[in-house]
């Protein structure tokens, strides 16, 4: 009841109004992805699974939502200076896509060791690549320098209210299509997606339990929730390359309040769930996108008999290096 | 203007009324699959492509439509005797699915050399497998004998008005979602799908040009249309295993009247189009399903600048034997 301002005010988080505004803002630039069901996967899990198929999103991942919201939130003067980020993954491509839609330049700082395919993807969307040394510190420092020198607007991959609000539109659409949901499971890396979804559901469907699913090899979010304080991890070793980041203050503020639990899965379980999604749902998903299904299959105590929304996050994967590839060329069927 | 009956009356073909009745009949048993678009594939083709994603159909292929229509068209007495077919591919599985939905037995005659995965798929849907010698003649003879002995109702994979009408629902849904279409491209094997779609479009959108796409290695439909008479081909050698069948009288009657042209594609073009669909559309498609895109990319003279519907037929494929698999196990990224 005190009116004395706190020394550590909570960070300003997106509201449902922000998420709805994001939805209106990005609708012309994104696909409304389908919600898919699969009797075989329902049978395996004992649950009714409703998959939001974001691999079918622009750029092949949900990241187009947050990136478009950030880019189209900029005033004209700021926008004219362009945008920049330091993600070489799906967010980098999504930011270039969003910038191209607005007709402004985009710059992506990435380690000089990044695979050529990621460089090419950014260039393919008309983005500019700035190479740096392969460390998180060098990426941050390079991005800060570029921003200071050129005046570009930095759009962080997840610790940004505009990005979080944009990702929350994913849950709004899923809920509209699925009707009621007992639970929602999304993967967690930096936490932008699960934060946006948790905020949307807290307002629209507070009875829906929100879970995050995380590789056991990159369990910083799990440990953070257990410890009650933000724990980071540098360069964890997981096949789920989209989930190697750690939360920052904004996403931690949401996750610590609104996420019921963080479920860990093994690398083998990720590969098995990925193969199941390809075989049964017929959707190309990247390893990160298979983490929620792996978690659901491991925890019938939480999910059996319930209606469970699942965010399939993305489908950007190298078809020549699939984790289950075992056949040598001469063994391939003609 | 003569009223004298012809000595060779045209076979009774499905009407739009039959296709609409099929749609009402099968609606509770099938998915309404999404129509997907992809800016990258539009760019490559110069066309506006609207993909009907039947890999997301029940059983992973459009075949559930025709099989459900046939099974749910049976009167109760006939249905109680069960159904049978001799397709070891998607139709066999679809028939078992449809029979299971109706609670009646299904039998699939397949060569004793059929891959274990196909046997298991039929058994997985609760079907019964009868093995025969690996020849088309043996399959037909075995099915005829089984039908005579047991009284099961035979459901041919494509030369059946109920099946053709069911497959036509695919074009009805695509047209509802896509609005107008300048052209539609579907693959052709026995011709059930393209026949059903062509009949639907002839009634609903006569300005839409219907093309069939066919592997050059299995060009019996192409040669039939050129010769003006039905030409069959035994066991053609193509990766597109769903397209190895030849038309029969009903499908030939439709194709010869309603299909504008039959476009041939090479095996290499099929593999390239399949990889493009996985990479860009993020849908798992089997080789047969990639044949229309291969044809469209080869013929900008026909399709550039036009709105083109594309039926992606199915996604049942062995993930361990992908045609572009080149990496030996030790080269696979960890």
Image: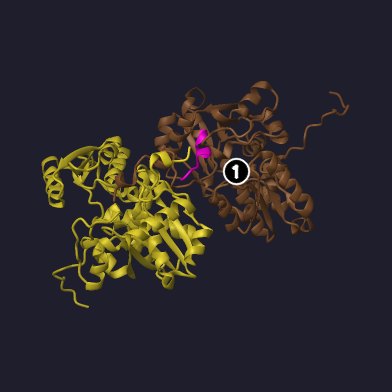
Chain colours: A yellow, B brown
Tell which residue pokes out farthest to the right in this image: B4
Residue at 64 percent of width and 41 percent of height: B168
Q: Which residue is mark 1?
A: B170
Q: Is residue A34 visible?
A: no
User: Can the viewer see residue A205 in this picture?
Assistant: yes
Characterize the magenta stretch by its predominant secondary structure. helix
Task: Say few, some or many: other residues with alpha carbon within 10 Å of mark 1 (under 14 / 14 to 19 / 20 or more).
Answer: many
The reply to whether the magenta stretch includes residue B47 is no
For the residue labelled by badge 1, is the local secondary structure a helix, a strand or a loop?
helix
At 21% across and 60% down in the image, what residue appears? A248
Q: Residue at x 24, y 68 (%)?
A: A223
x and y percentages locating residue B249 in the rendered image: 73, 33
Q: How many marks are shown on the rendered structure?
A: 1
Disc 1: host chain: B
Looking at the rendering, the stretch of residues picked out in magenta corresponds to: B284-292
- Residue B241: x and y in percent read 55, 39
């Amino acid at each position: 009841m005190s009116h004395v301002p706190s020394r550590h005010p909570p960070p300003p988080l997106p509201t449902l109004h922000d998420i709805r505004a994001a939805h209106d803002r990005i609708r012309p630039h994104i696909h409304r992805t389908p919600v898919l069901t699969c009797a075989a996967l329902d049978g395996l899990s004992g649950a009714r699974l409703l998959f939001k198929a974001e691999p079918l999103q622009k750029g092949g991942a949900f990241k187009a939502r947050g990136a478009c919201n950030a880019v189209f939130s900029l005033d004209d003067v700021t926008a004219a200076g362009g945008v920049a980020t330091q993600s070489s993954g799906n967010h980098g491509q999504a930011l270039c896509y969003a910038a191209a839609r607005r007709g402004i330049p985009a710059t992506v700082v990435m380690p000089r060791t990044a695979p050529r395919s990621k460089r090419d993807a950014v260039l393919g969307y008309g983005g500019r690549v700035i190479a740096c040394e392969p460390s998180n510190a060098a990426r941050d420092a390079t991005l800060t320098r570029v921003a200071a020198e050129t005046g570009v607007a930095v759009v962080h991959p997840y610790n940004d209210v505009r990005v979080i609000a944009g990702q929350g539109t994913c849950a709004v659409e899923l809920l509209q299509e699925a009707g009621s949901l007992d639970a929602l499971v999304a993967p967690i890396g930096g936490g932008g997606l699960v934060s946006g979804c948790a905020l949307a559901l807290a307002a629209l469907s507070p009875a829906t339990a929100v879970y995050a699913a995380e590789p056991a090899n990159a369990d910083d979010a799990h440990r953070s929730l257990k410890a009650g304080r933000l724990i980071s991890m540098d360069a964890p070793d997981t096949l789920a390359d989209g989930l190697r980041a750690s939360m920052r203050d904004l996403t931690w503020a949401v996750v610590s309040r609104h996420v019921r639990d963080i479920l860990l899965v093994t690398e083998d379980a990720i590969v098995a769930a990925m193969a199941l999604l390809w075989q049964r749902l017929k959707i190309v998903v990247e390893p990160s996108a298979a983490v929620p299904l792996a978690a659901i299959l491991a925890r019938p105590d939480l999910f059996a008999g319930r209606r469970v929304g699942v965010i399939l996050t993305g489908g950007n994967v190298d078809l020549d290096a699939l984790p289950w590839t075992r056949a040598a060329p001469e063994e391939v069927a003609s």
